[in-house]
Amino acid sequence: GRSPMAAAIISSDPQFCQHLRAILEDPETGVSVGLEISVDFTDIADSHLEQLRAAKPDVAFLDLTSDPHVGMKFAQFMVDQNMAGALIGVGSTDAPELLLQAMQAGITEYVGKPLEEASVLGAIERILRKTGRRGETGLAEPGKIFAIFSAKGGSGATTVAANLAIEIHRLTRKKTLLVDLDLELGETALMMGIEPRFSVIDLMRNFHRVDSGLLASYIQRHETGVEILSAPYQPSDYETVSAERVRQVLSFLHAQYEYIVVDCPKTFTPATQAALEEATEVYLVTTADIPSVRNLTRCLPLLRSAGRRKPDSWIRLVVNRFDPRDVVSVAEIEKTLGMEVFWTLRNDFRAVMAAINAGRPAATDTKSSFAKDVRALAAKITGVRAAQSERGWLSGFLGRDGRQGAEVKRKVPTNE
């Protein structure tokens, strides 16, 4: 029942203008073309600017093909002068740096040329939702955020985070996002075997104009179905990222995904602190060695204070590379930390390293004992049953202390 959005087209290509008008002429698009400026950006005169100001288009299509550099400058000028509600850039999709420049210039959506009807209509739909002309399609209830944290490098926390996200999505078939907050040396992209165009830093810098539609521009979808917001390829100064911005981003993502797995830095940066505060649950990943347990002991007071919740109700301890013959037993870890071990992941070092070096997640290896254990963990925390054949793997070790072979009064976690 609403009036259509007024649109302007700026292009010196008559065939492009004709094609775009043909796409937009269907009343169902919710767009009506009211102005067309058919000159190069360098030839735009004061009279054209007056026409734009008079038309006050809700959306303007900018054909950037002939001169992308000048086109970006003009887009920035339009944003500064508030000459259109939203900008849709059209041009080459082969250069990632061009897409980034478009976002930095204030272009809300970017579609490829030659035009594809589905791309144009998708961009329009996202703008309609952002402006309130279409109902937003967010979650009925916020999803869950699982923060993965380790107090010592080399514990395998990133491996756990990446594979846990895959198994959560595989079991639930719900929207799952993996976020790499290690802004200096994040490795989730390498772990997943992808080369993302944008990073979490790009999203944070442009967050002031991001909606659920534009978010897709920053997200990389993995073949397993998991979506990824990676760390920057070049190390970034984490001190330039405020805790408040991280909270804002995670809160926004919280409403877009059923499950979010956050791979946290191994230091208490502002990003780490914010992620721990926003998390539904925090999973502390450790290995059964003295340095790891000692570091966790030192970190626990900070972790507990970050949550501002019932002590330890949201913190869960995961022992990675578990072997019942480890010198440091599960019982000793629990006694030292004053908390129970929630889960153990078997030591399948050879299979995990082979997967990492091949640029593929270990979860894709159905024979990996580590992958089976992660799937069982995902089943536990989501409430979705894993296959019976993947459960009860620790039954042969129940009740045994790996170092002394003696009975343990409290059972080692069964992972069931």
Image: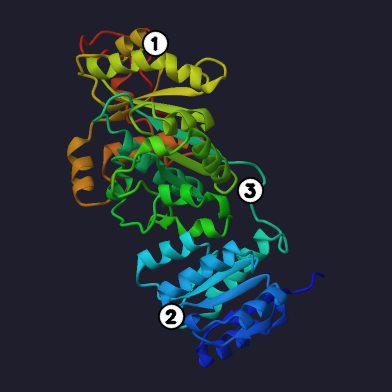
Exactly how many numbered labels are in the figure? 3
Mark 2 and mark 3: Cα distance apart in space = 37 Å
Mark 1 and mark 2: Cα distance apart in space = 68 Å
Position of residue 138 measured from the top left corner of the image (x, y, whole percent):
63, 51
Q: Which residue is drawn at 49% across and 63% down?
A: 105
Mark 1 and mark 3: Cα distance apart in space = 40 Å
- Residue corresponding to mark 2: 65
- Please state if 9 lies on the left or on the right of 241 as rendered: right
Question: Could you tell me if residue 152 is visible in this image?
Answer: yes
Specify the amino acid type for callout 3: Leu
- Residue corresponding to mark 1: 410
Closer to the chain start, of discs 2 and 3, is 2
Which image quadrant is residue 284 in?
top left
Residue situated in front as seen by the camera: 184 or 314: 184
- Residue corresponding to mark 3: 139
Crowd around label 3: few <14 · some 14–19 · many ≥20 (10 Å): few
Asked if 341 appears above or below 5 in the picture, the reply is above
- Please state if 5 lies on the left or on the right of 398 as rendered: right
Q: What element carries label 3?
A: loop
